[in-house]
Amino acid sequence: MALDSKIPAGPLENKWSEYKEHCKLINPANKRKLEIIVIGTGLAGASAAASLGEMGYKVKSFCFQDSPRRAHSIAAQGGINAAKNYQNDGDSVYRLFYDTLKGGDYRSRESNVWRLAEVSASIIDQCVAQGVPFAREYGGLLSNRSFGGVQVQRTFYAAGQTGQQLLLGAYSALERQVALGTVTVYDRHEMLDIVKIDGKARGIIARNLITGELERHFGFAVLICSGGYGNVYYLSTNAMGSNVTAAWKAHKQGAYFANACMTQIHPTCIPVSGDHQSKLTLMSESLRNDGRIWVPKQKGDTRKGNQIPEDERDYYLERRYPAFGNLVPRDVASRAAKERCDAGYGVGTSKQAVFLDFREAINRYGKVECGKHGIENPSEEVIREHGLAVIKEKYGNLFDMYAKITGEDPYQVPMRIYPAVHYVMGGLWVDYELMTSVEGLYCLGEANFSDHGANRLGASALMQGLADGYFVIPYTLGNYLANEIYNKPTSTDHPAFAEAEKNVADRISKLMDIKGKHSVDYFHKKLGKIMWEKCGMSRNEEGLKEAIEEIRTLRNEYWNNVRIPGTDKEFNPELDKAGRVADFIELGELMCIDALNRKESCGAHFREDSQTPDGEALRNDEEYMYVSAWEFKEAGDWQLHKEELNYTKLMPTQRNYK
Amino acid sequence: MEHYDMHLTLKVWRQPNGNTAGDFKIYEVNNISSEMSFLEMFDVLNERLINEGEDPIAFDHDCREGICGACSMVIDGKPHGPWAQNTTCQLHMRAFKDGDTIVVEPWRAKAFPVIKDLVVDRSSFDRIIQAGGYISVNTGNAVDANSLPIEKKKADDAFAAAACIGCGACVAACKNSSALLFTSAKVAQLSLLPQGAPERRTRVLDMVAQMDKEGFGSCTSTGACEATCPKGISITNIAKLNKEYFWASLTSE
């Protein structure tokens, strides 16, 4: 099948308004008859379900958590971008578009990114109207801060809990619709297959995670809003339950999987402390506004951070990238940290960490405060005391979190940080309308591929989730459903439902019957290790080929030797995990295949054989200016389709942050 | 930070499902590093139970960053364990000493029925929100965000109330299993903001009515909820709710 991205004709600036003005509408009486299924209740899923419910559609919303309010969008800390130009610093739709496209290393779809920038301002209006308590200035107006990779202040925030507040806004809109009867929430449910009839998505098979019963649900359209798949690496900043299952089932039913290998590694994570570790925790990117990153100049230096004098410190980001310094984009900062640690300059017991140091900021703020308070010739102690108060006000919650996890006091010693898997830019391929390559099957938010290119800038994930759910899908879905009003709902007794349910049941029995030697986590950790070492922060041809072989062996071993306790007709989290890890193993192979195919470095995808003489990522626009969209043939066999990327508004250039 | 290894005795509540009675079971665990989180210690124990052919202990957890509100267990009599303003997932083993015995139970409240072991059903919280914990605004036509200035102090107070993660520790800590801290946090947040004004009266009356219907007990102002809350939600929110409720009761038709 050829990839038709359905990008509307006409100038970039007018595409979305033209589309909105000409897309088909559905009369309210007909909307009530149209049932829609939404998988996932994060920012994309909850905002979509709430908006569609308001419009009059009959919505069924599914999440695996015990409440929609727990979706992992809740953990986003930093903020959400919007081209409001409230600060009068020259921001505009064009600048937000430009930063996002450049930040993504010119591997995102231009028309989608423009639309994202265009609707960004409405997101803030919508959230404020819902009662989301964004930070405010004394004048009562909204406050902004800046984030990595940009030169304007366009990030709106609610302390270090922006994701939580935005999600609770969408969640409350969703619960309002539940009360009004337009949305039904199925919590503790997991989608385990798509039901297709005559080539169109017509429903799902879901499993009730409390009873283990399989359920059939009909829908005129199915929306996958299930988030990212970073947990393929086992250790990541994702929630423990984050998984690829919904998207992967859709992929196996014909939805192409795009740019699978583009995984963002976030530079400021608390380092791994031991083999028991289950999860990684991020320190917000906002810390890089004031923190300076360094390693000792001397290899294998075992002194404590505070004992190393100024002239023996290597502020390597400031040295290598004088223009952006500590605020270089995430991919650049991550690789630079890895490079220093690999070269033997890492700190801490594991030597897999660098320092993030606030000493200079404490001193600087302290002097300003002493000045404000009229303290003459303050001692170093007094300066420090005042400086600490400022840092506490700005980053207190993050410092407390660091102390809780590491047992170290970051006000006294420099933090130790190391890069960690954070966000995936790859996902299901979608067209301009957010429809996958299966008719009637849509994909929103992190689960799709379209907006971030090869690297996501800070504060833009929340923006995309809400843009898709609040402002894009309400229009594009109607354009499809307008032709569906002539059809009657299909009974879930239809043979396609029965067959899909049987396939799901058979797979569960197969997993339960293995009764092997090792737990699900045992395999998940093995997969994670292969992925991190060979398809992680940097990749090469040889390593990727090895990884593919190792993952195939692991898949075989998994299906012969996994042990799942209990039964499938009870609350059994091990079984839920087993199904997800089976999908992760298949996905891991595709990620390596995708990485092997892309013999260029772009954004978060760094191929060692494609770099500039001074070690920077080297893109190859001649050969790789395309989206790689993979069609599933059978386990271990994919066919590559390419969507050429065309840029009309700005010409791709080499990213330079020096 | 010095790390140390521990041997611990765990007394954990086991209950196959909501229809079967539960009881405590004792587990000895070794080689627990003080660096582990409490849930990682459970992971280690569960791995062992699976290898020994036993049913692992079921517990709710997801983000393990202290924000999703999923993790919930009473540890040595305290919801989320001994550390102040903390969730179970952020509790680390250095809170305990080598040789300790630790008792672990689920949230206990009529409105939170047990599903299995330490997992309870908290959907009653969702139904309280459905009763009015929102602002009735449809997507798409909101006015410009800065057309509605909000005093910084009020915005900050609203944020402090909005920080509630809906974990239910307040209910578990309360001798009456009252959900008033949770409900009041939402009522306070929305009543502090001009957006919440039009539905102020119906919101508080409906949310409190739903709370009672779910089987939560009454508040007797002992403050255990505030003392236990992982996000430091203040009981001044309860005072705000009471004021709202009183006013709404007087003025409702």
Image (cartoon, rainbow, N blue to C red):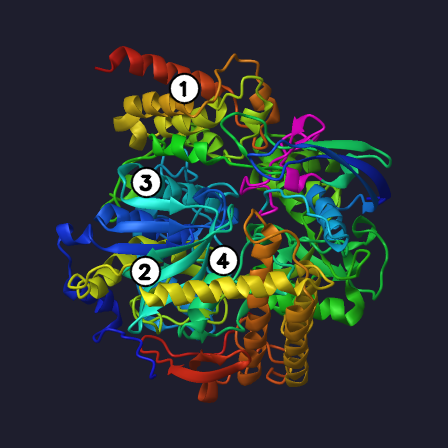
In x, y percent, where is residue A316? 68, 65
Residue at numbered disc 2: A493
Residue type, mark 3 in image: Val
Q: Which chain does the residue under circle 2 lie in?
A: A
Q: Check contact, mark 1 vs mark 2: CB within 8 A.
A: no
Image spot of residue B135 (x, y percent):
31, 35
Q: Nearer the viewer, residue B46 or A443?
A: B46
Q: CA distance from mark 4 to mark 1?
A: 37 Å
Residue A518 in picture, x, y percent from top left = 72, 62
Q: Are marks 4 and 1 in contact (CB under 8 Å)?
A: no
Question: Mark 3 or mark 4, which is nearer the start of the sequence?
Answer: 3
User: Residue at 64% of width from left, 78% of height from top?
Assistant: A552
Asked if A242 appears above or below B227 in the picture, the reply is below
Q: Which residue is mark 3?
A: A178
Q: Inspect this view and state whether residue B111 appears.
A: yes
Whole-number angstrom distance, CA of label 4 to CA of label 3: 33 Å
Residue carrying label 1: B241
- Above or below residue A546? Residue A455 is above
Note whether A488 is above or below A290 in the view shown.
Answer: below
Q: Give SS at disc 2.
A: loop
**Which residue is tagged 4?**
A458
Q: Secondary structure at mark 1?
A: helix
For the record, the magenta segment spans B62-91
Q: Calculate the distance from the C-alpha at mark 1 to the C-alpha at mark 2.
A: 50 Å
Q: Report helix, strand or loop for mark 3.
A: helix
Q: Nearer the viewer, mark 4 or mark 2?
A: 2
Q: Quadrant of the C terminus of chain A?
A: bottom right
Residue A469 image-quadrant placement:
bottom left
